[in-house]
Amino acid sequence: MSTSGQTDTSGQQGTFGQQGTFEQRGIVVVAHNLRSAHNVGSLLRTGEVFAVDTVHVTGFTPYPQHPDDERDPVLAARQTRRLAKAAAGAERTMPLRRHDDVHALLDSLHEDGYTVAGLEIDPDAVTLGDYSPGPKVALVLGDEVRGIDPDLRSRCDLLLEIPMFGRKSSLNVSVAAGIALYALRAM
């Protein structure tokens, strides 16, 4: 863990996002308090497919084991195995950074020119199809049960939602992220 409270676990830097047929808008993901290592693994794999620049994990979101890992080695290894099963190798190629302070991360993203967009079911949310993203977007994801905490919602520039047409009114967080990342990349 570096003194800034960030850990880079990507394994490869500078090689990702150089290819692809979509416009190369800067997209990062902030995964805050996701519970499932499988969801994080799926998010890394999806991020790789849609040329996400970095996945930032905060709170208790699981992340792969790394050389300076301060977690219990048994817990870190278990989370890494579960994550790797869904990531299918993307845990070694998708840049990932762990941050101790989500508020400082969002402040930094704002300073770097990112529009911070929370993906959330909310009466004030903009439907994904009606959103015209700028050149840099940070997509914020919340936990699988309660979504994005109210204090983090208030720090987002806007909230985005995926229209639902069936009987169910929510999606798995990694599935929702995939839909949103496709839309952000293809727009």
Image (cartoon, rainbow, N blue to C red):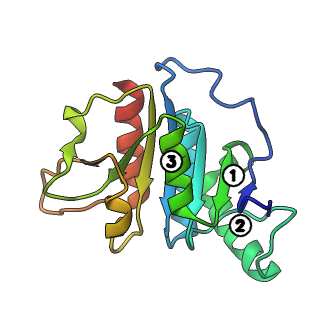
Decide: is 161 above or below 151: above
Seen in the image, is 24 located left or right of residue 65? left
Q: Position of residue 182 (x, y in %)?
A: 39, 35
Name which of mark 1 and mark 3 comes first in the sequence.
Answer: 3
Residue placed under numbered mark 3 in the picture? 29
Image point (43%, 46%), residue name:
139
Label 3 – label 2 distance at C-alpha: 19 Å
Real-space Cα distance between discs 1 and 3?
A: 15 Å
Residue drawn at (39%, 69%) of the image: 144
Do tag 2 and tag 1 residues touch (Cβ < 8 Å)? yes
Mark yes or no: residue 76 visible: yes
- How would you rate the neighbour count of disc 2 (Cα within 10 Å): few for under 14, some for 14-19, many for 20 or more? many
Mark 1 and mark 3 residues within 8 Å of each other at the beta carbon: no
Q: Label 1, on which residue?
A: 91
Amino acid found under the numbered disc labelled 3: Val
Q: Residue at x 47, y 19 (%)?
A: 23
Left or right placement of residue 177 versus residue 80 in this view: left
Q: How far apart are the alpha carbons under marks 2 and 1?
A: 9 Å
| Secondary element type, mark 3 | strand
Label whose residue precedes the other's in the sequence (3 or 2): 3
Badge 2 is on which residue? Answer: 80
Residue 151, x across and y down, in percent: 36, 67
Residue at image location 12% in from the left, 62% down from the top: 167
Q: Position of residue 103 (x, y in %)?
A: 50, 61
N-terminal label among 2 and 1: 2
Between 97 and 152, the one nearer to me in the picture: 152
Q: Is residue 79 left or right of residue 140?
A: right
Label 1 is placed on what type of residue?
Answer: Glu
Compared to residue 175, the image places residue 169 above or below, namely below
